[in-house]
Image (cartoon, rainbow, N blue to C red):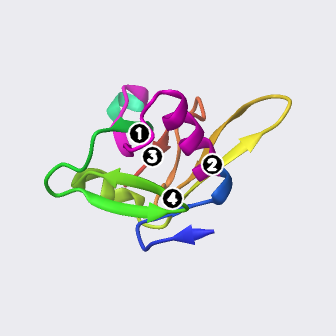
Amino acid sequence: MADSELLVLTERAADKIKGFLDAEGDGGRALRFRVLRTHCMGGRGHAYDLRASEGPSEGDEVVEAHGVRLLVDPASARVVKGTEIDYAESLEASGFAITNPNATGKCPCGHHDLFE
């Protein structure tokens, strides 16, 4: 497992990200990791957004692990320190599993993290 103070990226997650970027023809690009406010619980819920990006913007934190570059904007960086990004597959679901130690709870639907 490769990590930084900001994010921990498992090798399994990195392999999925590389496969996604290669399939999209974006092999040289990076993955942007953002925390977005949702309408859940009156705007207190937060979701994670992962998408291909051309490169860093001013102020971005850049994390490199297992051959993948992750870009994190300054606002998101404040609430993701120590977050682990993994990839899980089961009969019920497959996808990125994000564990954020800074979350203080989940919204009632269970899909969005809450922060103080």
Front: mark 3 or 1? 1
Front: mark 3 or 4? 4
Say what amino acid the circle numbered 2 marks: Asp
* Mark positioned earlier in the residue sequence (2 or 4): 2
* Mark positioned earlier in the residue sequence (2 or 3): 2
Task: Name the residue that disc number 4 marks.
Answer: 67
Task: Name the residue that disc number 1 marks.
Answer: 46
Q: Which residues are magenta?
A: 13-40
* Residue 46 magenta: no
* Residue 17 magenta: yes
In this picture, is 18 found above or below 64? above
* Mark positioned earlier in the residue sequence (1 or 2): 2
Dot 4 crowding, Cα within 10 Å, few <14, some 14–19, many 20+: few
Give SS at disc 4: loop
Front: mark 1 or 2? 2
Say what amino acid the circle numbered 3 marks: Leu
Q: Are marks 3 and 1 in contact (CB under 8 Å)?
A: yes
Task: Name the residue that disc number 2 marks.
Answer: 15
Identify which residue, 93 or 106, lies in the foreground: 93
Q: Please give the name of the residue rendered at 62% of the width and 59% of the height, measured from the top-left corner.
A: 10
Give SS at disc 3: strand
Q: Is 111 placed left or right of 41 in the picture?
A: right
Say what amino acid the circle numbered 4 marks: Gly
- Per the rendering, the mark at residue 114 is 3
Front: mark 2 or 3? 2
Of all residues, the one furthest to the right in this rendering is 91
Front: mark 4 or 1? 4
Give SS at disc 2: helix
